[in-house]
Image (tube, rainbow, N blue to C red):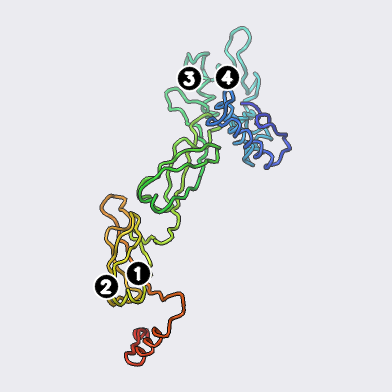
Amino acid sequence: MRDPYVVLGVQKAADAAEIKKAFRKLAKKYHPDQSTEAKAKEKFAEVSAAYEILGDEKKRAAFDRGEIDAEGKPRFQGFEGFGAGAGPGGFGRRAQGGGFDHFEYNFGGRPGGGGQGFDTSDIFSELFGAGRRAGAQSRSMPRGEDVNVQVTVSLAESVNGTKTRVSLPTGRTLEVSIPAGIEDGKQIRLKGQGRPSPYGSEAGDAMVTVHIAKHPFLRVDGRDLRLDLPLTLYEAVLGARVTVPTLGGSVELSIPPNSNGGRTLRLRGKGLPNSQGSGAGDLLVSLRLVLPDEPADAQFVALMRQWQSDKPYDPRKDLA
């Protein structure tokens, strides 16, 4: 991979904001879903991998110090006892004339893996984690980072299921299926839709957290729904049939005569469906008495004064 500074087109002295701006510009230019550029997919992956290095403060510092390469892999600096060239205590390339090099000779290996002992390629694999000892399982390289995104759906959409589009931090826009009955705060995992791995292994995942928007009338209480239903004084005294909203549409509710404010009526099965498919919760309707907005007329006031005088009662006696 090319130098990440060259890929993003920024100077080594560029600050984090400049690097982020350059990445966003190139990511938009080469986004596979909208770009008409040749080899846009490859260029987008290169830009993303470069930002994996320069967009991370620690990785960028390590790259600038020469500790990792442009792919984020550790650079071999050499260590005591194994020098860069042939000589006592070290090893080198194959000697001119076709003889074994020191490393191969000392460990009993031969070019191509023949002979006794360790194969040189296996020794390098064990030292640097880049391969495997003969017959051993390959070490997996780190996958790309996961990304997180939030999405909000309506209460009805959470009950019935829906599809919605989400924009990922990687620059991609995807359509996500929201399953019916999902609860607030639950996550949906999109495999392989996270950031690409700088090591060439599998990409990370996208974690979509689903939030449920507040309903204008209905409140969630477990699998039940609650509704405050305004009533006139005469509906509460005489009884009535009134229309109430539910997630499945409006239904009629019978109000018994002499219903007090605060009384709760139950509409069975009008709550949230059970995620296991074993029925639904209920709609709990609390009655709330509401007087007219305009001032009471003289006749109504006179009736109330007569009630106060002839039929007094204490609704707060249980609070004493």
Q: Is residue 217 above or below residue 75?
A: below
Q: According to the image, label 3 marks what residue?
A: 117
Kindly report the distance in space between the C-alpha atoms of the residues bearing marks 2 and 3: 93 Å
Specify which label sits upstream in the sequence, 3 or 1.
3
Mark 4, other Cα within 10 Å: few <14 / some 14–19 / many ≥20: many
Alpha carbon of mark 4 to alpha carbon of mark 1: how far? 85 Å
Left or right? Give the position of 248 relative to 117: left
At label 3, the amino acid type is Gly
User: Dot 1: what SS?
Assistant: strand
Q: Do the residues labelled 3 and 4 touch (CB within 8 Å)?
A: no
Examine the image and state in which quarter residue 256 appears.
Answer: bottom left
Tell me which label, 2 or 3, sits earlier in the chain.
3
Q: Residue 267 carries which label?
A: none
Residue to which mark 4 is pinned: 103
Real-space CA distance between mark 3 and mark 4, rounded to the nearest whole angstrom: 12 Å
The answer for how far apart the CA atoms under marks 1 and 2 are is: 13 Å
Image spot of residue 185 (x, y percent): 44, 52
Residue at left 52%, top 39%?
145
Q: What element carries label 2?
A: loop
Residue type, label 4: Phe
Label placed on residue 286: 1
**Mark earlier in primary sequence (1, 2):** 2
Instruction: State how far apart marks 4 and 2 are (Cα).
Output: 96 Å
**Residue tagged by mark 2?**
256
